[in-house]
Amino acid sequence: MSKYADLCAYGRKGATLGSIGALLGWDQETYMPRGGGEARAEQMALLAGMMHERKTAKEFGDLISACEGESLSDEQAACVREFRRDYDKATKLPQSLVEELARTGSKAQDVWKDARKANDFAMFQPWLEKMVDLSRQKADCYGFGEGGEVYDALLDEYEPNATAREVEAVFTPLGEKLSALVKELTENGTAPDDAPTTVHAPEDRQHALGMHVLKAIGFDLNTGRLDVTTHPFCSGFGPGDTRLTTRYDEKFFPGALYGTMHEAGHGMYEQGLPKSKTHEGPAGDAIATFGTPLADSISLGIHESQSRMWENMVGRSRAFWSWIYKEACDQFAELGKFSEDEVYRAVNIVRPSFIRVEADEGTYNLHVMLRFGIERAMISGDLSVADLPGAWNERFKQMLGLDVPDHANGCLQDVHWSFGLFGYFPTYTLGNLYAAQLWKTINGQLPGLEDDFAKGDFGRLLAWLNENVHTHGRRYGAGELCEKVTGATLSAEPLLEYLGGKLRPVYGL
């Protein structure tokens, strides 16, 4: 047995531990009784410590070093390279910090739920202060290079090799152009009527519609499921087990429909990764791919590109509504009062709103940019946690023109900071950029795709994504994959072109 095979087997055991942790997290978000919070925090801390021990063990480092001296194929070399990256990062963190992050994050998550429900920022503030402090400690351990900043070390966890300055350089002009587009639409165009989106939609009917869509677009329900939570997410535990969550509002069915499609985009990426497959080792032996970087997603930006593509470029398309309109009317009786075109235009309204996950395509990225600026300031120390609500409300007014009515619709709406996921938010907009660039390429290579959608056939799109994005795992970096597949480096132009080309006609421009 080669050292490479030993390394992959070692990684597989670590990935199995990780899948147990993900299952505990999913359970906490869905079915765990509220009284289980304290015990769950200790379970998460213990497991995080065990995983960290494996990630930093001398045996692991020695196996990586041994493989770096072997003659390997490009695929095998990429696998070892990414194992090295993970090992080098993990060994910079003390186990006590890893355990405390897991323990505090688990407790903070439960407090966040109560604080959001009670609209009480003071309840959450001390926990957020703890998570900011622990995140700074983690960043200091990682280091961020000469000329960098603390935030870079956290961003690198989710979007490898990206920096805050690079993100800012993209976000600033993009934000200006998006704001100009929103202004053009709202001041010069004719806004669609939003009445179709507010029809009475019983929760069970919304669930039925969501399941109908999941089956049609290709999410495999034999290896996945859909449940309800406070903040929708997707968990890919391992081979044959990918779980989605959503939430329902009987007065606004698009929230659940598009939330479900969004998480399904993540889920189909997880199902498309080669977790159940084998790859060839140096001796020609078949080696299980699960547990290696070849079965992991590249970055959160690429992961998000999949969810945003299915949610918006597919789900908010004219062709999609040509297909789903009748089924939606069958589920929501009042929807039949409106024409197919009226419903399509209604789900594409551009209107500044408070909740990011329910924001329209035109304003969504402004929400992300706001969070990027705020969390960057909190991590640097330029903004204290105590001043977060005021800063949030002020920047929200500047960027989206709305007066935030309460904390639940403001700085308490997202779960991310309770987990200490600082550096995560920018990947949402990076995902939109990747999605638009991929979408332009896809439509050039797959003529007649809209005709497929109008018939409820999404197979060609999913097959293309499986072949060009999912199957590679972490063999390529995000930017490298983007250039390999689209023939160009990442640019904001495809997103601006897509949004303008779609939204201006919706507004009669």
Image (cartoon, rainbow, N blue to C red):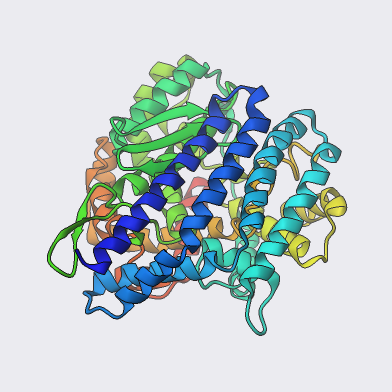
Quarter in which the N terminus is drawn: bottom left
Is residue 499 placed above or below 245 in the rendered structure? below
Q: Residue at x 23, y 43 (%)?
A: 459
Query: Does the image show residue 422?
Result: yes
Is residue 502 placed above or below 221 in the rendered structure? below
Q: Residue at x 44, y 35 (%)?
A: 244
Question: Is 204 on the left or on the right of 327, as rendered?
Answer: right
* Place of residue 23 in the rendered image (x, y in percent of width and height, measured from the top left): 47, 36
Query: How many marks on residues?
Result: 0
Please tell me which residue lies in front, 451 or 67: 67
> What is the residue that sits farthest to the left in this orientation?
284
Q: Residue at x 49, y 46 (%)?
A: 506
Query: Does the image show residue 181?
Result: no
Is residue 148 placed above or below 442 in the rendered structure? below
> What is the residue that sits farthest to the bottom in this orientation?
146
* Place of residue 65 in the rendered image (x, y in percent of width and height, measured from the top left): 37, 76
* Place of residue 307 in the rendered image (x, y in percent of width and height, measured from the top left): 44, 48
Please tell me which residue lies in front, 353 or 306: 306
Is residue 397 placed above or below 149 in the rendered structure? above
Please tell me which residue lies in front, 118 or 13: 13
Q: Residue at x 47, y 63 (%)?
A: 57
Please tell me which residue lies in front, 391 or 68: 68
